[in-house]
Image (spheres, rainbow, N blue to C red):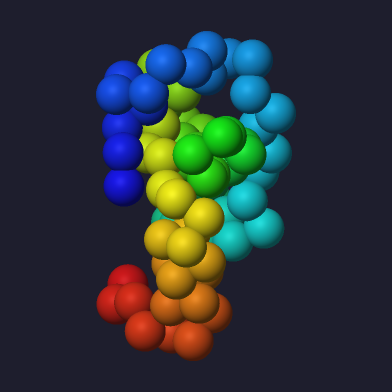
Amino acid sequence: MHRAADIAMDVERLAWRKSSFSGGGQNGNGCVEVAPVPAGVAVRDTKDRALAPHVYSGPAWTALLGAVRSGDLAA
């Protein structure tokens, strides 16, 4: 995983969309947004967009989604 600060990109120009896995937090505050980037996928916290997003490679993103879908990640 990389931090957006380590990769030259204008995060406000990315095509952000709300993740279909969002909304599970208390009071519906577990939202994240995702955007495709040349290095893979950028992920940011919808509540605090000023923070730099995390950037995952394609294989790392696929592995993360697989772990979420299979329930391998502890809440």
Give the residue at x 40% y 32%: 53
Give percent across and percent down for residue 35.
61, 37
- Where, quadrant-wise, is the C terminus in this rendering? bottom left
Q: Does residue 21 appear to the left or right of 7 in the view shown?
A: right
Q: How many marks?
A: 0
Observer-nearest of 46 and 66 = 66
Residue 48 lies in what quarter of the image? top left
Give the residue at x 29% y 24%: 6
| Residue 70 position (above or below residue 62) | below
Residue 69 lies in what quarter of the image? bottom right
Give the residue at x 47% y 63%: 59
Evaluate whether residue 68 shows in this view: no
Give the residue at x 37% y 23%: 7
| Residue 60 position (above or below residue 65) | above
| Residue 9 position (above or below residue 29) | above
Observer-nearest of 51 and 36 = 36
Observer-nearest of 47 and 66 = 66
Evaluate whether residue 72 shows in this view: yes
Q: Does residue 6 appear to the left or right of 48 in the view shown?
A: left
Observer-nearest of 8 and 21 = 8
Give percent across and percent down for residue 71.
44, 84
